[in-house]
Image (cartoon, grey):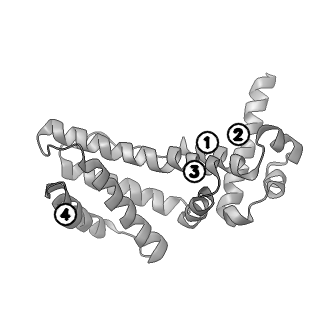
Amino acid sequence: MAQARGLARELAILAAANEVLNELGYERLSVDAVAARARASKATIYARWPDKASLVAAALVAQSHDQPRLPWHARSLREDLVALLELFVHLAETESLTTFMGVLAAAESEPALAEAVRQTALTPRYQDCRDIVQRAIGRGEISSPDVAERIFELTMGHILVRYVLLHRPLDQKDQLEFVDQVLMPALRAPSS
């Protein structure tokens, strides 16, 4: 029973850390603010996480378990790419990209954050791209597994530019145009 209470307490602290992170950003987040939100003592937090970076890293990992997954029912490369872009757009519109960019900036000097970003944001999306490519190879639509990186970079770059720099969301028409006019032609181009 005590172990279950301890886990529930830990999850409540991590949820509070995510809330404060999304409200204030990484730079302005403090352990004091998380402790107040979670109704926990700073000693309780520091006993489990030695610093702000490790607390935020753990919070990102905990939150990532609730992220939607790429569906597997597509019958073509194009359908898979449309689903992938819909997933990226969903994440961009439900997660705070400003917060994400702040965490990315801090990750340059905080190894725990860098690992959390890789584990929660980059690796799963890159794996989605690899899965799409493997299915397309299996269907005979493409032949090179190397294009997964191209899909990932083009899609991630497009999402970040549109949502972070331009503040212009991608509606369904924009998404289909990106798939048809950028991704599909890029995948047909020879790898260098």
Residue 175 % position (x, y): 30, 65
Question: Camera-side residue: 93 or 186?
Answer: 186
- The earlier-in-sequence mark between 3 and 2 is 2
Front position among marks 3 and 1:
3
| Side of 51 where 131 appears, left or right | left
- The earlier-in-sequence mark between 3 and 1 is 1
Front position among marks 3 and 2:
3
What residue appears at the point 62 percent right and 49 percent down from the top-left corner? 111
| Side of 63 where 38 appears, left or right | right
Front position among marks 3 and 4:
3
Marks 4 and 3: in contact by CB < 8 Å? no
Question: Camera-side residue: 76 or 160?
Answer: 160
Q: Which mark is residue 11?
A: 2
* Element type at mark 4: helix
What residue appears at the point 51 percent right and 47 percent down from the top-left corner? 118
Q: Which mark is residue 170?
A: none
What residue appears at the point 26 percent right and 40 percent down from the top-left corner? 73
Question: Camera-side residue: 158 or 69?
Answer: 158
Quadrant including the N terminus: top right
* Element type at mark 1: helix
* Element type at mark 3: helix
Q: Which residue type does callout 2 highlight?
A: Leu
In this figure, which residue is indicated by the disc labeled 4? 180
Marks 1 and 2: in contact by CB < 8 Å? yes
In this figure, which residue is indicated by the disc labeled 1? 62
- The earlier-in-sequence mark between 2 and 1 is 2
Q: Which residue type does callout 4 highlight?
A: Asp
* Disc 2 from disc 4: Cα separation: 42 Å
In this figure, which residue is indicated by the disc labeled 3? 114
Q: Which residue type does callout 1 highlight?
A: Ala
- The earlier-in-sequence mark between 4 and 1 is 1
